[in-house]
């Protein structure tokens, strides 16, 4: 009986060996699976960290079309500012897309006989900017162009006594630039109002001069006329809200190309010389 007890102990010890091996094997498999999961999780986290965050959508443009530039100013206003206009309906500027860019101008010589003649020139131009995910909202792009146009007018070549001031009550923001300019041997008074409403920039220029002994128009009268016409033009833009097509505006480079196509020497600044400036009626 005493010999059988040690023998039984050895048998039980040997029987326990396979059970321990199985336990070790299961533990090893469990560890491997856990490492794989950790690697997969790490890879997923890395991919998420490397992905760029989604940019918020830009604000939609307020205006998707432009008014007809030649009808943006009331007929009576044109008649008052440009007496004896050569073309009552105005001369439209060239544009590859009138929903993006449009312009019109009027000029005329009011011959007063022995009292001399009064020359006037008026122009209005619209530029619309659509919202673009990469370039920004239409309003932001228009604000940038508005600032550039104001700076451009302040730096007009040959301008004398140039001054700029806010023009309240015209669009979201507006600036009036005034100056004198000597050309065709006469003194001209200039007033340009640059205004922004939503995603559209409006540039209106009005100038005049006296010929054959007539007095140069007052700077105050020219500015007053420019502000009145600019307010009407901006009002026409506001009336187009929600109308027209939602075509995208050209990039800055395209806009510059369009500018070159539209430009004519003397057209923007009213350099056209009156036909009958020298000989007043007797």
Image (tube, rainbow, N blue to C red):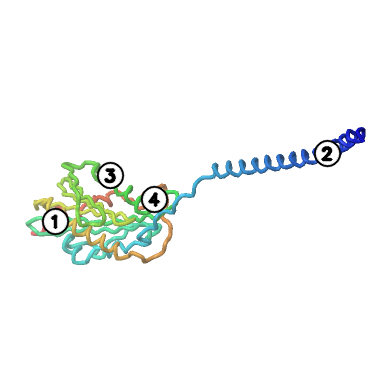
In the rendering, at what x and y percent does residue 237 appear? 30, 62
* Mark 4, residue position: 255
Q: Nearest the camera: 266 or 10? A: 10
* Residue at x 13%, y 59% (from the top left corner): 111
Q: Earlier in the sequence, mark 2 or mark 1?
A: 2
Q: Callout 1 environment at 10 Å: few (<14), some (14 to 19), or many (20+)? A: many
Count of marks placed on residues: 4
Please identify, in this view, whether the residue under mark 1 or under mark 3 is nearer the observer.
3
Q: Earlier in the sequence, mark 4 or mark 3?
A: 3
* Residue at x 64%, y 41% (from the top left corner): 38
Q: Callout 4 environment at 10 Å: few (<14), some (14 to 19), or many (20+)? A: some
Spatial separation of the CA atoms under disc 3 and disc 2: 96 Å
- Mark number displayed over residue 16: 2
Spatial separation of the CA atoms under disc 1 and disc 4: 35 Å
Asked if marks 4 and 3 touch (Cβ < 8 Å), the reply is no
Spatial separation of the CA atoms under disc 4 and disc 3: 16 Å
User: Secondary structure beneath disc 4?
Assistant: helix
Q: Earlier in the sequence, mark 2 or mark 4?
A: 2
- Mark number displayed over residue 118: 1
Q: Earlier in the sequence, mark 1 or mark 3?
A: 1
Q: Is residue 53 left or right of residue 262?
A: right
Q: Callout 3 environment at 10 Å: few (<14), some (14 to 19), or many (20+)? A: few
In the rendering, at what x and y percent does residue 173 appear? 25, 53
Would residue 275 be visible to someone looking at this image? no
**Looking at the rendering, which quadrant does residue 151 occupy?**
top left
Q: Nearest the camera: 105 or 219? A: 219
Please identify, in this view, whether the residue under mark 2 or under mark 4 is nearer the observer.
2
* Mark 3, residue position: 152
Would residue 8 be visible to someone looking at this image? yes
Q: Is residue 238 left or right of residue 217?
A: right
Spatial separation of the CA atoms under disc 1 and disc 3: 27 Å
Q: Give the farthest residue toward the front.
A: 1
């Amino acid at each position: 009986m005493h010999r059988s007890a040690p023998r039984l102990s050895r048998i039980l010890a040997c029987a326990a060996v396979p059970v321990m091996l199985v336990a070790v094997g299961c533990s090893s498999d469990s560890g491997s699976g856990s490492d794989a999961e950790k690697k997969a999780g790490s890879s997923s986290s890395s991919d998420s960290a490397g992905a760029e965050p989604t940019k918020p959508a830009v604000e939609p443009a307020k205006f998707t079309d432009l008014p007809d530039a030649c009808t943006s100013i009331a007929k009576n206003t044109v008649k008052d500012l440009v007496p004896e206009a050569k073309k009552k309906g105005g001369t439209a500027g060239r544009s590859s897309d009138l929903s993006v860019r449009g312009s019109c101008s009027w000029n005329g010589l009011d011959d007063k006989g022995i009292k001399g003649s009064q020359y006037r020139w008026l122009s209005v131009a619209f530029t619309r900017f659509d919202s673009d995910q990469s370039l920004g909202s239409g309003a932001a792009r228009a604000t940038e162009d508005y600032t550039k146009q104001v700076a451009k007018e302040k730096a007009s070549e040959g301008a004398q006594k140039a001054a700029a001031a806010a023009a309240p009550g015209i669009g979201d923001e507006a600036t009036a630039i005034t100056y004198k300019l000597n050309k065709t041997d006469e003194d001209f008074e200039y007033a340009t109002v640059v205004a922004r409403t939503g995603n559209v920039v409006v540039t209106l220029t009005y100038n005049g001069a006296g010929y054959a002994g007539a007095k140069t128009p007052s700077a105050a009268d020219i500015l007053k006329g420019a502000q009145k016409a600019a307010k009407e033009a901006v009002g026409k833009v506001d009336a187009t809200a929600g109308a027209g097509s939602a075509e995208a505006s050209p990039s800055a480079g395209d806009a510059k190309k369009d500018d070159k196509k539209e430009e004519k020497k003397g057209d923007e600044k009213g350099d056209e010389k009156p036909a009958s400036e020298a000989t007043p009626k007797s």
